[in-house]
């Protein structure tokens, strides 16, 4: 009997190994890719109805999963939103209040750090913007000797990186950066790239991201990667090929539309590589923007006369504003075999949700020693659930707002409050605060309690 059991065990081991070698897979953990554009408007993509800008790669990928019609960036500007991605927490909990303000604190727990514990290899590619990357070489706005803002990708759980501290031009990224001290593409402590940095910036980034994927696949290693494109943040520049695609439009539009299409080509390149390697069906991909479109029209960050030609899709406000146009962003999630295809959902989500959602997929849950602002979205993505329990809170300088399933309370000056019914009035045209005083009172109290919780976190009490 013992011999029979032993023989069965050997056969199981051999056949299992043969099957794994035939399929090229022994790893069952999903690969995870978080893709983000910079200053892309809700209405700048075909899957949200844009008829001018060519985004076939994004549209095809979006149709392979769930499009999120009501998805929010945690902030109306870049740096704070990026921190929410990695921590599941609102940026006012750890002091990244605005662009180029604060840095990722050592005590914060990042998604990359958690996934490293689960055996993942981790990589960051593109714009970092969560602290200075160099303390020895002047770099960007905050890098260099004596910097108080040092917080690098490798200090926050990333094994591999190809990262800039801040925005760069979307064509020839190391040229004409329009700042006193240019930033670099850093690959490690004191080490930056000097080769293959010409042409489309999205292509420059993808040239480094794909080898990371290939190496992980070769070693049958689950990978977690963040690809944070600079497109279409200023300086907005498109190459000749892409300008020619839009030659019937004025120069500003040519550059803006062209750089988005160039980025879209790299999305297709990424998707095709996953298929070529045979790992597309075991890879979860998310896409969104870090905030609404820049430019004139209601936001703090306005660039009159520049090339910010983005569309908010009709939503009120733009980058820098807590009205919908500043924080409602184009987004989708793709996970073959787990999520439906060609699906749209109006379930409210936010970038802070990625942290608990991904940890939930892996069955490990969030660390319990601090409050989180994100929730696990996977059930809502898999079902037709449209109602989010609880609320999503926002703060940005004097502005503050609270969004429930139906209502939005907002103050742009920190004192006077407006109320909107986002189900009936998603473009925020009809302020109903005076006719719903009880709802204003209820939501103000919730907002004040949440702000106090953020202040408690920001004072460091979560780290004790």
Image (cartoon, helix red, strand yellow):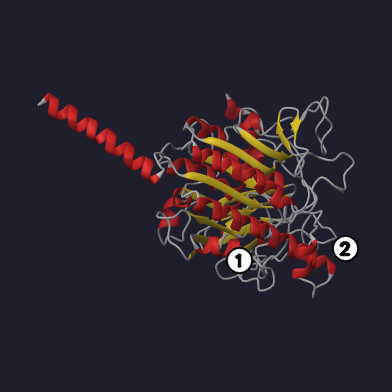
Coordinates of residue 118 in the picture (x, y in percent): 46, 33
* Residue carrying label 1: 56
The kind of secondary structure element at disc 1 is: helix
Q: Residue furthest bottom?
A: 248
Q: Residue furthest right?
A: 180
* Residue carrying label 2: 305
Along the viewing direction, whichever of 91 and 124 lies nearer the viewer: 124
Direction from residue 248 to residue 56 in the image, left or right: left
Coordinates of residue 282 in the picture (x, y in percent): 44, 48
Coordinates of residue 363 in the picture (x, y in percent): 40, 39
Direction from residue 23 to residue 355 in the image, left or right: right
The answer to whether one can see residue 209 in this image is yes
Along the viewing direction, whichever of 319 and 336 lies nearer the viewer: 336
The kind of secondary structure element at disc 2 is: loop
Q: Residue at x 76, y 43 (%)?
A: 166
Q: Nearer the viewer, mark 1 or mark 2?
A: 1
Residue 60 higher or lower than 77, as above or below: below
Q: Which quadrant of the view contains residue 133?
A: top right
Image quadrant containing the N terminus: top left
Q: Which quadrant of the view contains residue 249?
A: bottom right
Residue 454 higher or lower than 398, as above or below: above
Disc with the residue nearer the chain's start (1 vs 2): 1
């Amino acid at each position: 009997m013992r011999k029979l059991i032993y023989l069965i065990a050997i056969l199981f081991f051999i056949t299992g190994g043969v099957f794994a070698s035939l399929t090229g897979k022994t790893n069952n953990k999903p690969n995870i890719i978080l893709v983000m554009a910079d200053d892309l408007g809700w209405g700048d993509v075909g899957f949200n109805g844009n008829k001018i800008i060519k985004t076939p790669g994004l549209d095809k990928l979006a149709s392979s999963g769930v499009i999120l019609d009501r998805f929010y960036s945690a902030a109306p500007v870049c740096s704070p939103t990026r921190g929410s991605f990695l921590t599941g927490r609102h940026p006012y909990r750890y002091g990244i209040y605005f662009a180029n303000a604060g840095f990722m604190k050592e005590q914060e727990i990042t998604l990359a750090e958690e996934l490293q514990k689960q055996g993942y290899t981790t990589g960051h590619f593109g714009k970092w913007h969560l602290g200075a990357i160099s303390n020895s070489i002047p770099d960007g706005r905050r890098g260099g000797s004596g910097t108080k803002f040092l917080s690098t990708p490798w200090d926050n759980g990333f094994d591999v990186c190809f990262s800039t501290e801040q925005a760069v031009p979307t064509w020839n990224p190391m040229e004409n950066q329009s700042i006193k001290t240019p930033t670099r593409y850093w690959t490690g402590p004191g080490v930056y790239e000097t080769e293959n940095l010409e042409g489309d910036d999205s292509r420059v980034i993808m040239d480094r991201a794909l080898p990371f994927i290939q190496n992980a696949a070769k070693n049958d290693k689950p990978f977690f990667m963040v690809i944070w494109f600079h497109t279409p943040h200023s300086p907005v520049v498109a190459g000749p090929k892409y300008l020619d695609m839009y030659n019937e439009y004025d120069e500003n539009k040519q550059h803006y539309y062209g750089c988005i299409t160039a980025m879209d080509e790299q999305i297709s390149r990424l998707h095709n590589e996953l298929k070529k390697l045979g790992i597309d069906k075991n890879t979860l991909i998310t896409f969104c923007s870090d905030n609404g479109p820049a430019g004139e029209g209601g936001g703090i960050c306005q660039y009159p006369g520049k090339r910010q030609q983005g569309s908010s899709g009709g939503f009120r406000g733009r980058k820098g504003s807590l009205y919908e146009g500043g924080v409602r962003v184009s987004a989708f999630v793709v996970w073959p075999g787990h999520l439906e295809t060609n699906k749209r959902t109006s379930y409210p989500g936010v970038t802070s949700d990625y942290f608990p959602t991904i940890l939930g997929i892996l069955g490990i849950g969030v660390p319990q020693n601090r409050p989180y602002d994100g929730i696990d979205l996977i059930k809502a993505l898999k079902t037709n659930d449209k109602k989010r329990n609880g609320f999503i809170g926002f703060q940005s300088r004097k502005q503050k707002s609270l969004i429930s399933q139906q209502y939005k309370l907002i103050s742009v000056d920190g004192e006077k409050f407006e109320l909107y019914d986002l189900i009936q009035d998603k473009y925020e045209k009809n302020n109903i605060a005076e006719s719903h005083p009880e709802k204003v009172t209820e939501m103000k109290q919730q907002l004040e309690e949440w702000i106090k919780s953020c202040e408690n976190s920001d004072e460091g009490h979560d780290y004790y």
